[in-house]
Image (spheres, rainbow, N blue to C red):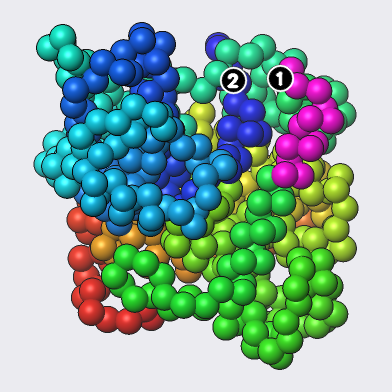
Amino acid sequence: MSHEAISVFDMFKIGVGPSSSHTLGPWRAANLFLGSLRHKNLLDKIVSLEVLLYGSLAKTGKGHGTDIAIQLGLSGDDPVTFNVSMIDAKINDIKTRQKLILNGWYEIDFDPAEDIEFLMNESLPYHPNALTFLVVLNNGDHIAETYYSIGGGFVKTEGGEIDEDSETILPFPINDAHDLLHWCMKTGLGIGEVVMENENAWREEEKTRKGLLNIWEVMKECLYKGCHTEGILPGGLNVKRRAALLNKKLLKDKHYFDFDSWINAIKEGGHDFKYILDWVSCFALAVNEENAAFGRVVTAPTNGAAGVIPAVLAYYIIFCDANDENKIIQFLLTASEVGCIFKKGATISAAMGGCQAEIGVSSSMAAAALTEGMGGTQRQALMASEIAMEHHLGMTCDPIAGLVQIPCIERNTMGAIKAITACQLSLQSAPDFAKVSLDNVVKTMWNTAMDMNSKYKETADGGLAINVPLGLSEC
């Protein structure tokens, strides 16, 4: 059986909100399309360009900023480094001038209102998140390339996946939890240690460590900024940010000007259950409010679920005395492998599997990482992962107005708390007596996704998306 190789840096991608599948994926697809044109020496021969959005990308693309991401991607901007404060200015300039500067140097006529088409009633068979770039050249030739944004910022073309890591030969190939446990038992290594050995097939260990600490640095910046930014989220629902107000309340209006002094102040507040619960919720709200505001986040494994892992990791660091680089790196490595298992055996795309594929997977990832970090065995970590997903099975994706706000932001708080609860349950349990394995629950999640009505898969055609009047304030 072949083994797909997925790196920790494929699961944790630095990007821009609000959606990994509807924003980051299309952005990357546009970058890749530019690369295809450059490779064929066709970039300066383009007369016109049109973009067709299908399925879920069409139905919730406006709310998810898909059109914005495509314009930035075609401009040659990088989602990892682009200054997010300049998004509005750049998009307004394209709209006003009706000009698009491809790859930053070749200008063509482009009217976003006309040249990006939302085909609400059309879908392509491979995946609900499909987009096609249509180009006319100055010699009259036409070019069409189709890309699929399959969740978590992963992109495929008609010919196959284009994440270059997938062909790497790993010392410990893993497709499912059984494989992972086999290598742990055979080598005596922990989950995070097995994953690090695999990462060594791509790069030196020091580079992996540095990269993971950078991932945590972006998460930290997002946590801090989200907990110190008030206001109304964009999109028209008039959703009020809550993390900053909760942060103020919990710290009794005291302000701390850097992350370390801030978390030290939080830690000094004690270990009361309600106090910790409020902070975990605050952390998760902060990240996903930033995500909803087109801020810089880390897909974990998606943007819509980006708050779960930072919230649980912050809980681990602050309330479990884990402010240590080695522990943080181990946490991220372990979490990433669980995400890989779900991607290989099921899906991490809400358009394919509902919100169980996003919040459920992120909760499962965090549960395993926290359990191992708290001294649990490999089997207890996988048990925690199973417990977390088991109690997200069937969760629908029904964003109101197609925005990653209601119920998405609050769902991150629930996913984080479930991860912590799953960890505690597994640490107090014997895996020998567990009736459901992680592989069982991955298979069940995929079967549930296949049975789920399409209107509950990020289309805004069902559930809360149609049953909550848009004039109401957030509950």
x%, y% of residue 286?
Answer: 57, 67
The answer to if 281 sits in the magenta stretch is: no
Q: Is residue 27 left or right of residue 56?
A: right
Q: Is residue 431 left or right of residue 58?
A: right
Magenta span covers which residues? 201-214
Residue at horizontal 64 percent and vertical 28 percent from the top: 7
Q: Amino acid at mark 1?
A: Trp
Q: Which residue is mark 2?
A: 165
Q: Earlier in the sequence, mark 1 or mark 2?
A: 2
| Magenta stretch, overall SS | helix
Disc 1 and disc 2 in contact, CB within 8 angstroms: yes
Residue 48 lies, with reference to residue 370, above or below; the image says above
The answer to if 211 sits in the magenta stretch is: yes
Q: Which residue is mark 1?
A: 202
Question: Is disc 1 placed on a helix, strand or loop?
Answer: loop
Quadrant of the rendered structure where residue 14 is?
top right
Q: Amino acid at mark 2?
A: Asp
Q: Is residue 282 left or right of residue 106?
A: right
Dot 2 alpha-carbon crowd within 10 angstroms: few under 14, some 14 to 19, many 20 or more: some
* Alpha carbon distance from label 1 to label 2: 8 Å
x%, y% of residue 108?
Answer: 25, 31
x%, y% of residue 22?
Answer: 36, 44
Question: Is disc 2 placed on a helix, strand or loop?
Answer: helix
Residue at horizontal 76 percent and vertical 32 percent from the top: 208
Question: On residue 238, which mark appears?
Answer: none
Residue at horizontal 17 percent and vertical 19 percent from the top: 136
x%, y% of residue 225?
Answer: 62, 66
Instruction: Give the quarter of the figure containing the N terminus.
Output: top right
Residue at horizontal 46 percent and vertical 20 percent from the top: 162
Of 139 and 413, the residue lying toward us: 139
Of 183 and 22, the residue lying toward us: 22
Q: How many marks?
A: 2
